Image (spheres, rainbow, N blue to C red):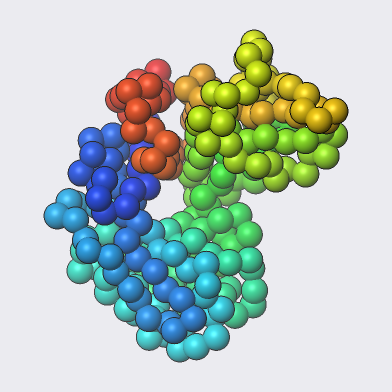
Amino acid sequence: MKDFHFFISSPPDTALQAGRLGQVSLMAYRVGRSFRLERAALPNVRCALMEVDMTGFTGYGPHQGLAEELTRECCLRGYGGIVPHLPRPSVSVVRFLETLSRELARRRLVLWLSPAYARVVPGSRLLLPSRGAWGSFRGYVERNRLPGRTALSFSLLAEDFTLPDLTGRGCVLPSRAFAALPAQRLHYSPELEISYVTYVRDGRAHVVLQEDERSVKNRMKIGEELDISAFFFPYSAIESPKTVLKNGDDVIK
């Protein structure tokens, strides 16, 4: 039987609970323009990966020193790799990631990157967001995956799109806003593998896509068929009793 890996992204205060659902990807680090690694108070919980907020990072600075510091933190805390949250692609950030990838590879650690970076940074792995799919979900994964180097990342969010302007960038709806939508029957798209509901507001048609338990199970099944065995989930979206991750293996079966 294939060995599946479930990573739960969690801040320090919920890391213990997240660890009951899968391997914890700890959201406790930040690197900004200063090229300094900042840490939140770390939990006394074993975590699999470290997530680093680098949204303000420019890449202009001492690459080697920062790459070595991040790698040392991985080794010291027993993490298996790094998941950086990065700004839009730039040459300077790519150069830093190349340095970081080399440092991690020397210690057999993993660098998980978004599609914009994973294709140009040697040795990295791809974190493919499920919410980027349009049309056929299977086709989306087949076109974008890197064989043997891909994980699917689920958002479990509801997104509101105004028709016909489907740009791929909807407005994320909090759970309360989704529940407050006009009562209509929820539909399911077997091609996109997602639940949806349509409504009209101020004369404009809208479609809301909702990644729920059914869509996650079916999307994971497609990932399995395409040789993907690693899956990321946000703890903030799965902590309710209706979670799709009551037991990791049950999601695949």
Furthest-bottom residue in this view: 62
* Image point (55%, 86%), residue name: 60
Left or right of residue 195: residue 154? left
Residue 226 visible in the picture: no
Of residues 91 and 3, the one drawn nearer to the viewer in this rendering: 91
* Image point (66%, 13%), residue name: 184
Of residues 41 and 50, the one drawn nearer to the viewer in this rendering: 41
**Position of 232 relative to 184 (above/below):** below
* Image point (56%, 56%), residue name: 114
**Marker count (numbered):** 0
Q: Position of residue 102 (x, y in %)?
A: 43, 73
**Residue 95 position by quadrant:** bottom right
Q: Position of residue 253 (x, y in %)?
A: 40, 18
Residue 66 visible in the picture: yes
**Residue 80 position by quadrant:** bottom left
Q: Position of residue 178 (x, y in %)?
A: 57, 28
Of residues 67 and 188, the one drawn nearer to the viewer in this rendering: 188
* Image point (28%, 34%), residue name: 21
The quarter in which the N terminus is drawn is top left
Furthest-top residue in this view: 185
Left or right of residue 43: residue 177? right
Q: Position of residue 137 (x, y in %)?
A: 65, 31
Furthest-left residue in this view: 44
